[in-house]
Image (cartoon, grey):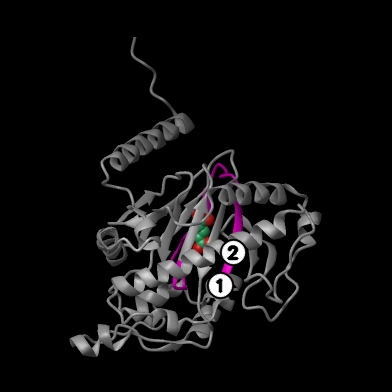
Amino acid sequence: MARPRPQGREREIGKRKRRETSAARDLEMGEASIPTIDLSPFLREDEDGKKKAMEVITKAFSEYGFFQVVNHGVSLNLMKETLEISKVFFDYSDEEKSKSRPSCPNAPLPAGYTRQPAHSRDKNEFFLTFPPGSNFNVFPQNPPQFRDLFKEMFVQMSKLGVVLESIINECLGLPTNFLKEFNDDRNSDFLVALRYFPASNNDNNGLLEHEDGNIVSLVIQDEVGGLQVHKNGEWIPVVPVEGTIVVNLGDVIQVLSNKKFKSATHRVVSTEGRNRYSYVFFHNLRGDRWIEPIPQFTKDIGEPPKYRGFLFKDYQELRMRNKTHPPSRPEDVIHISHYEMDT
Ligand SMILES: O=C(O)CCC(=O)C(=O)O
């Protein structure tokens, strides 16, 4: 007897399963995945291992700005514990979570607990801190371990951010410590814990397609997954693997390198019936830094600059306005285009 054709929702699920199976097959074949880099050669100065890894990293940054790392120096236990503790925190009532709402109006970003407003297309809530000791920080009393775990995570992710910045420096062929000296103040870095709400029947948007505005971001996601990267014109799922950290390049490097390296276009898709948890560390820079393509990627090689110069803080404000009064500059919601020049 012929099997009845699946209808409506069943048919959609079938289609999705087929898409997932084919994505999984591609992943096995390495066609639709992002590379995984072992960072241990950088931590123990193994020159041969470093050279091989840098080739892969340079390719990934030149094409789509994304890869993931293992042996990165961040404690695997800490990664597990911080994900667990944020589940406890986000499960509290709104009233309890509201006790750690941001209280510093002049902070560059809202430090503390924030839920995206109802009109936002991004369906998530988050908790943000600046470096331990920052006056902007607001911590909840409960769960009691939250503050210490968050601080420890900040310290370890910050070390990794510095390592990755020096790798970017080397992959770009910049003079030793160029980026370290340009970006010598760690007070603007921030760490965010996120909870994405389950997808509904007509909306699976956790976080809309975007690029990060900073130097480099580091993502730890739980087993639910949902992070996707735009690569070769397709959305590629970053399949969660316990212990790995996802690295994505931000706009500042794209501008400094005159688009030699690309900031990563990415988004988060939510899952039916499940919350998703993640941590993102933003290796950032001071607002008063002047950003423009470096001569090494322009006049030294006879290339016109693809961006005019700007103050980093002005770009941050423009991005923030796009969130609070969406969209103030629709052309900058995904890519950095405000400062782009016709070449
Ligand atoms: O939660 C994630 O996996 C990624 C979050 C992200 O892309 C962002 O906060 O910019």
Q: According to the image, label 2 marks what residue?
A: 154
Q: Quadrant of the C terminus?
A: bottom left
Foreground of the two, 206 or 147 = 147
Whether residue 334 appears in this view of the structure is: no
Q: How many marks?
A: 2
Classed neighbour count for the residue bearing mark 1: other residues with Cα under 10 Å, few (<14), some (14–19), many (≥20): many
Q: Which residue lies most toward the top here?
A: 1
User: Looking at the picture, which amino acid does disc 1 mark?
Assistant: Asp
- Residue at image point 53% right, 79% down: 316
Foreground of the two, 1 or 231 = 231
Foreground of the two, 326 or 8 = 326
- Residue at image point 25% right, 60% down: 48
Q: According to the image, label 1 marks what residue?
A: 189
Q: Which residue lies most toward the left here?
A: 302
Q: Which x, y percent locates residue 47?
A: 28, 63
Q: Is residue 99 left or right of residue 254?
A: right
- Residue at image point 21% right, 89% down: 300
Q: Is residue 179 left or right of residue 313?
A: left
Q: Which x, y percent locates residue 342?
A: 28, 84
Quarter of the image for residue 186 reads bottom right
What segment is highlighted magenta in the picture? 189-216
Q: Quadrant of the N terminus?
A: top left
Relative to 178, say whether 77 is above or below: above
Q: The residue tagged with tag 2: helix, strand or loop?
A: helix
User: Looking at the picture, which amino acid does disc 2 mark?
Assistant: Phe
Q: Which x, y percent locates residue 206?
A: 54, 53
Which comes before the other along the chain, label 1 or label 2?
A: 2
